[in-house]
Amino acid sequence: MKEQKMDLKHELKRDVIADYVRQGIDLIKLHKENALITLAIVAAIVILVPLYLQRRASNYDRAQEMLTTGDFYARQKVYKVGAESDAQSYVLFHTTDEKFKKTQETYQQILNLYPGSPAAEDATFKIAACLYEEKKYDQALDQYRSYLNRYRKGKFVAQTNLGIACALEQKKDYAMAIESLQKVADDKNAGPWAVEALYHQGLCWEKQRSSKKAHDVFGEIEKSYPNTYWAFLAAEKTGNGLGKDESK
């Protein structure tokens, strides 16, 4: 009886040991598979990431080239057919419609092909500027606002708010224009656009027949931005300009 119990204990021990051995083998296999998977992932990263970065850099370069081309079109003069015949072979555009269409198409290609590129920000803003120059104020407003929605901290925020204000001014929505101009004037990063915004604000107050407010704004320009182009224009408005009669 005792011998049977001893045999049973030995059997149980062997089963337990065998079970541990099997678990150990399974664990080794599992770690081996995980190690292979990890190695494959690392290899993929090492190979694919540089390729991705290289391709992205190449796309960014193409987008920048397209932006340069669009800027080139935007700077071109328009010559009517027959005008300045000695320069006809160098003329790109004979109408402003041709010029704006080609310029905007080039900028739009950047947005279509390379929307995540740095050049896309420039293209978005410049399309709006083209539309404003074409006097398509409603479309320009939509495009300016599209820029602000996408690039809340972009490099053209001040210019965009100024563009919105000027478009509203052209549409004779002076109250909204003044509000937008104030955003530019209060923007610490607005740089030279702040004083231009103040000047347009003065013009809007004039058009609303608020002479005192307009005079106060022009006076603020003279005080805060002396010896500037805008101060000269403001002085003409306040009567302190070069045309003032000093004999009085």
Image (cartoon, rainbow, N blue to C red):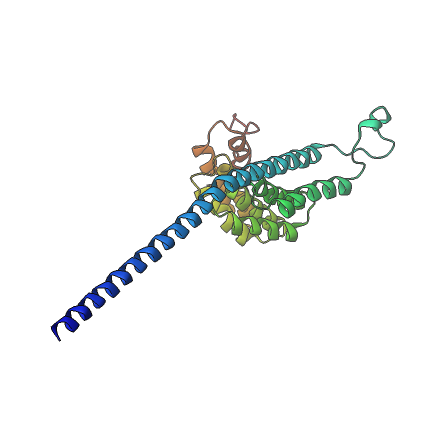
- Find residue 84 and report its image quarter: top right
Is 181 situated above or below 79? below
Judge from the rendering whether residue 165 lies leftward or rightward of residue 26; answer left or right: right
Q: Where in the figure is residue 208, as x and y percent of width and height? A: 56, 51
Residue 155 visible in rendering: no
Tally of marks? 0
Q: Where in the figure is residue 68, as x and y percent of width and height? A: 65, 33
Q: Quadrant of the N terminus?
A: bottom left
Depth check, front residue: 121 or 207? 121
Q: Where in the figure is residue 44, as x and y percent of width and height? A: 49, 44
Outermost residue to the left = 2
- Find residue 89 and report its image quarter: top right
Q: Where in the figure is residue 226, as x and y percent of width and height? A: 46, 29
Image point (27%, 60%), residue name = 20
Depth check, front residue: 67 or 94? 67
Image point (80%, 30%), residue name = 91
Outermost residue to the top = 86
Judge from the rendering whether residue 91 lies leftward or rightward of residue 237; answer left or right: right
Is 227 situated above or below 160? above
Image point (43%, 33%), residue name = 223
- Find residue 5 and report its image quarter: bottom left
Residue 229 visible in rendering: yes
Judge from the rendering whether residue 233 lies leftward or rightward of residue 96; answer left or right: left
Depth check, front residue: 135 or 15? 15
